[in-house]
Image (tube, helix red, strand yellow):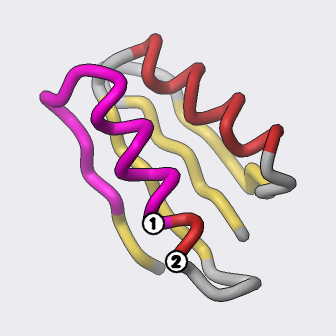
């Protein structure tokens, strides 16, 4: 599973990075996204919904975690 760690970065840069990595990933690829920005977390969830990317799991706390499947 590929890990995309965008902690410490402000949107929209993390969103762009996650979008690019999702676009380059083969069908069925799983990615784990780590962010410490709640707004970015929400935007990445929205990105997934708009692009038919499955959210397999999520965690909310000091670090927000999203497990995605393309």
* Horizontal relation, residue 45 to residue 64: left or right: right
Task: Please count the marks in the image.
Answer: 2
Q: Is residue 25 above or below residue 32?
A: below
At x 62%, y 40%, the residue is 58
For label 2, the crowd category at 10 Å Cα-Cα, with few meaning under 14, some 14 to 19 and many 20 or more, is few
* Horizontal relation, residue 18 to residue 26: left or right: left
Residue 24's tag is 2
At x 58%, y 20%, the residue is 42
Q: Residue furthest left?
A: 8
The quadrant of the picture occupied by the C terminus is bottom right
Q: Is residue 25 above or below residue 47?
A: below
- Quadrant hosting residue 49: top right
- Quadrant hosting residue 22: bottom right
Q: Is residue 5 magenta?
A: yes
Residue 59 drawn at (x, y percent): 54, 34
Q: Is residue 18 magenta?
A: yes
Residue 65 drawn at (x, y percent): 47, 41
* Horizontal relation, residue 37 to residue 20: left or right: left
Residue 69 drawn at (x, y percent): 70, 67
Q: CA distance from mark 2 to mark 1?
A: 5 Å
* Residue that mark 1 sits on: 21
In the image, the segment drawn in magenta is 4-21
Q: Secondary structure at mark 1?
A: helix
At x 29%, y 25%, the residue is 36
CB under 8 Å between discs 2 and 1? yes
Residue 62 drawn at (x, y percent): 30, 20
* Horizontal relation, residue 53 to residue 47: left or right: right
Q: Secondary structure at mark 2?
A: helix
């Amino acid at each position: 599973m590929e890990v995309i760690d965008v902690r410490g970065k402000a949107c929209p840069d993390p969103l762009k990075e996650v979008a690019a990595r999702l676009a380059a990933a083969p069908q069925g690829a799983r990615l784990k996204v780590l962010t410490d920005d709640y707004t970015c977390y929400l935007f990445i969830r929205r990105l997934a919904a708009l692009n038919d990317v499955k959210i397999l799991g999520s965690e909310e706390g000091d670090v927000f975690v999203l497990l995605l499947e393309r």
